[in-house]
């Protein structure tokens, strides 16, 4: 009985692994072969980087890459600063209007970005910011989810440390930046992963706001490549790898802290 | 008990407001005002290029929308996606969490593997799935052998396009809900399971009478979050039904609100 259950367990685990690994292997494998070798298992010597070279030489992929990186880094840093500060105030201070603000934060989480896409675009156009990378940063700095996560996290860490810092003569801002943020590893990692993936992968806003090919971000640029090269599966899949690899590497580096962060930031039952 | 408001309190208030100020500015300017404008604009005939012609039309835009067949069909598709994808992903993610929650070597690896699709761009996932389910591709062949489905590209097939979207959506999302269930499972004390085992409960009985009821808050969260995000699905549809050379599947065409 024990043995049967053990075997069953392994079979189910393997089945899930195949379902999750297969598309990844299929993508990487087919991005590394010539058009004539598609779908075949070829010896290692026949693998080629030609598809990647073609992407980098015929399209401004390096440029798109830099654009995406700049936007993502600016978004991650500004989102962490602005939203953890607000979350900290909601968790630690008592002040008139606190509950109202918290309810506003919760309500804002329910509204999808699609709802405000048009007025935001009109605003950007008034600033002459449309078709500039800044249009992909400034409207996205406030993130209600991150305010919420920060509040939940700061409620769980003990207050004594901050009181001690205050007694030692550190101001409120000093306490926050020098004492609280450095011990908020799980929170910062969770927000970093969510902010990084959210910005790196975003497609709707950049495809709406950007017009000039050189100013595209990777997701938009590679979508245009895909639409023109759809028949050339190996080239398109090389684009998919380029879009996915940085984010997977980032996730693998941070994932240990991330699971811990999930438990302390309120994204759970 | 009313506390006297002292100088110290005022200073704390001021600090709190200062901490909130940056977020409040961005929220007001890039969220609240646009949201109000969006709501207001929906009652106007509005053209950004010719502002002179803009005028109030009341509920006309809504009437137009709801008498548009494409819109009604889009709603129907959205509801289908929610009704099919959410139950499937809830059950599968629970199953995966129960597996990963067992103590075995390498569970960290599997947890990371199952979660990783969630961090990848939906556009990338959609592209890969369109190839996986193109004509004569391995998965199309497999499905046509197993279930007798047509061996043609699913993305352009009116009958299969929606199934394809749901498949890729669930594949990408389950890892996220698995993590939610995992943290829910970790709040269940091990002693409860132990004592049930001593009393002679089978594995299934433990799951059905102990684990399942205790996970109720997590399940509520998983379903709520699942419904909200399934309703907002955009990138996958845009990738499959967009301007690709593959063309747009007539029946699978979705307009998103």
Image (spheres, rainbow, N blue to C red):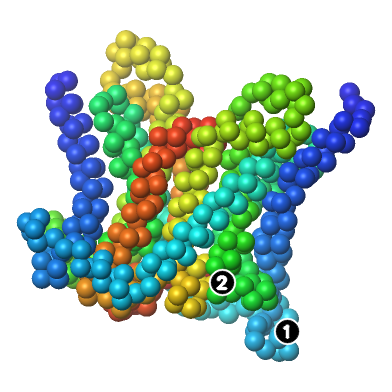
Q: Is residue A213 visible to us here?
A: yes
* Left or right side of A253 for A15: left
Tag on residue A132? 2
Chain identity of mark 2: A
Q: Which image quadrant is residue A26 in?
A: bottom left
Kindly identify the residue that appears in the image at 46 percent across and 32 percent down: A260
Tag on residue B170? none
Kindly identify the residue that appears in the image at 44 percent across and 34 percent down: A257
Is B123 rendered above or below residue B19? below
Q: Residues within 10 Å of mark 1 (few under 14, many from 20)?
A: few
* Left or right side of A178 for B249: left
Q: Nearer the viewer, residue A256 or B162?
A: A256
Residue B257 in the image, given as x and y percentages of width and height? 53, 68
Kindly identify the residue that appears in the image at 36 percent across and 42 percent down: A252
Q: Nearer the viewer, residue B128 or A221?
A: A221
Tag on residue B55? 1
Determine whether the residue tagged by mark 1 lies in a helix, strand or loop: strand
Q: Specify whether disc 2 shares its chain with disc 1.
A: no
Q: Which image quadrant is residue A63 in?
A: bottom left
Residue A247 in the image, given as x and y percentages of width and height? 39, 52
Q: Nearer the viewer, residue B210 or B178?
A: B178
């Amino acid at each position: 009985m024990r043995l049967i259950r053990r075997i069953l367990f392994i079979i189910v685990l393997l089945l899930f692994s195949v379902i999750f690994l297969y598309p990844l292997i299929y993508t990487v494998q087919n991005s590394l072969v010539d058009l004539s070798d598609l779908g075949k298992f070829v010896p290692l010597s026949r693998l080629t980087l030609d598809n990647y070279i073609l992407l980098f030489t015929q399209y401004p992929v390096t440029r798109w890459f830099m654009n995406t990186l700049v936007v993502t880094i600016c978004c991650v840093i500004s989102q962490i600063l602005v939203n953890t500060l607000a979350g900290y105030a909601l968790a630690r201070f008592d002040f008139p209007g606190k509950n109202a603000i918290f309810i506003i934060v919760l309500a804002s989480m329910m509204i999808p970005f699609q709802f405000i896409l048009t007025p935001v675009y009109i605003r950007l156009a008034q600033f002459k910011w449309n078709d500039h990378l800044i249009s992909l940063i400034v409207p996205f700095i406030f993130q209600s989810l991150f305010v919420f996560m920060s509040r939940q996290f700061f409620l769980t860490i003990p207050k004594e440390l901050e009181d001690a810092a205050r007694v030692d003569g550190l101001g409120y801002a000093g306490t926050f930046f020098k004492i609280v943020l450095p011990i908020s590893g799980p929170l910062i990692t969770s927000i970093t992963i969510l902010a990084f993936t959210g910005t790196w992968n975003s497609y709707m806003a950049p495809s709406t706001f950007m017009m000039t090919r050189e100013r595209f971000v990777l997701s938009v640029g590679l979508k245009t490549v895909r639409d023109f090269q759809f028949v050339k599966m190996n080239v398109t899949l090389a684009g998919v790898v380029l879009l996915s690899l940085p984010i997977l590497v980032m996730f693998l580096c941070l994932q240990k802290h991330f699971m811990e962060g999930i438990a302390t930031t309120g994204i759970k039952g | 008990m009313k506390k006297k408001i002292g100088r110290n309190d005022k200073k704390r208030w001021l600090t709190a407001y200062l901490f909130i100020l940056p977020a409040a500015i961005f929220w007001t300017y890039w969220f609240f005002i646009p949201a109000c404008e969006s709501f207001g604009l929906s009652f106007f005939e509005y053209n950004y290029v010719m502002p002179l012609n803009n005028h109030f039309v009341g509920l006309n835009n809504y009437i137009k929308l709801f008498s548009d067949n494409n819109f009604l069909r889009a709603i129907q598709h959205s509801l289908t996606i929610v009704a099919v994808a959410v139950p499937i992903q809830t059950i599968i993610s629970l199953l995966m969490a129960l597996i990963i929650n067992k103590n075995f070597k390498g569970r960290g690896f599997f947890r990371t593997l199952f979660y990783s699709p969630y961090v990848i761009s939906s556009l990338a996932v959609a592209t890969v799935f369109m190839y996986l389910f193109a004509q004569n591709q391995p998965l199309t062949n497999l499905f046509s052998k197993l279930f007798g489905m047509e061996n043609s590209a699913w993305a352009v097939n009116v009958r299969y396009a929606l199934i394809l979207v749901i498949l890729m959506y669930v594949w990408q999302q389950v890892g996220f809900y698995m993590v939610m269930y995992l943290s829910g499972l970790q709040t269940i004390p091990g002693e409860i399971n132990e004592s049930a085992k001593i009393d002679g409960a089978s594995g299934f009985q433990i799951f059905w009478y102990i684990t399942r009821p205790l996970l109720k808050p997590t399940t509520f969260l998983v379903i709520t979050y699942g419904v909200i995000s399934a309703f907002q699905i955009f990138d996958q549809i845009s990738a499959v039904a967009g301007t690709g050379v593959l063309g747009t599947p007539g029946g699978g065409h979705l307009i998103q609100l």
